[in-house]
Amino acid sequence: MTGQPGRESPCPSGFSHRRLPANRSICLLRQHNYFCSTGDGNPADGNHTTFFQVLPTPRLYARFPFYNLMNNEDSFARLRLKPHARVSLRGDVHHLRLSDARDLWYVGGGAFQDKTFGYIGRPSGGKKSLGTLFDLSADFNVTQTTVLTLYASGVRGGRVQSFVYPAAGDNPAARFVYFELSHRF
């Protein structure tokens, strides 16, 4: 495999817009973002041009781990609220697509598994749509060192998932929920 890191730019530059209101008694943050990474337009030519996420921390950005930053376009909006000093709320909506339909749909969170290096790739069937993800979370600061997090998300899969999982029908759905108690020492 060969490639020229840093020299390829098939995607438009990403952008981010943030707005804080004048009334900060609730502390509101709205964001609108676009992210695009490279995909490989010709997987058979011996040149690997897919952006490779070497040692990621996917949970900060993709808390429902059905996608990562490889061969990905992510248009999303985020709303953060802090209605109380001990409470933080966050809601995201992501519209996800493959950057290149001839490349794979990559999933995984990095170097945690010996046989795959933590990533796998599924064929896209020439499709681009990965679906739309909705997620909500609430963080409660129980003490200065203890946080309780509640997270729920749902995805309405796109044509790629319909190709990979034909028994699930058009636009297969998935849900992910967790509760987490974190304590810093």
Image: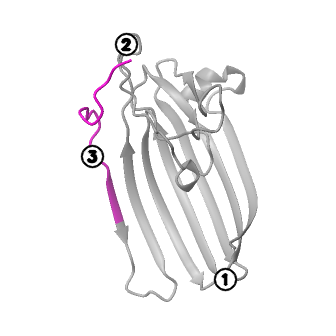
Q: Position of residue 42 (x, y in %)?
A: 36, 15
Disc assigned to residue 175 = none
Residue 3 is inside the magenta segment:
yes
Residue 116 sits in which quadrant?
top right
- Say which of marks 3 and 1 sits in front: 1
Q: CA distance from mark 1 to mark 2?
A: 52 Å
Of mark 3 and mark 2, the one earlier in the sequence is 3
Find the magenta span and give its range.
Answer: 1-17
Residue furthest to the left in view is 7
**Kind of element beneath mark 3:** loop
User: Residue at coordinates 44% horizontally, 32% vertically from top-left?
Assistant: 98
Vertical comparison of 44 with 105: above or below? above
According to the picture, the residue beneath numbered tag 2 turns out to be 46
Residue 147 sits in which quadrant?
bottom right
According to the picture, the residue beneath numbered tag 3 turns out to be 13
In the picture, measured across the screen, residue 162 lies left or right of residue 31, that is: right
The quarter of the rendered structure image containing the N terminus is top left
Of mark 3 and mark 1, the one earlier in the sequence is 3
Amino acid under disc 1: Gln
According to the picture, the residue beneath numbered tag 1 turns out to be 144
User: Residue at coordinates 59% horizontally, 31% vertically from top-left?
Assistant: 117
For the rendered model, the colour scheme is one colour
Q: Position of residue 96 (x, y in %)?
A: 48, 41
- Say which of marks 3 and 2 sits in front: 2
Of mark 1 and mark 2, the one earlier in the sequence is 2
Check contact, mark 3 vs mark 2: CB within 8 A. Answer: no
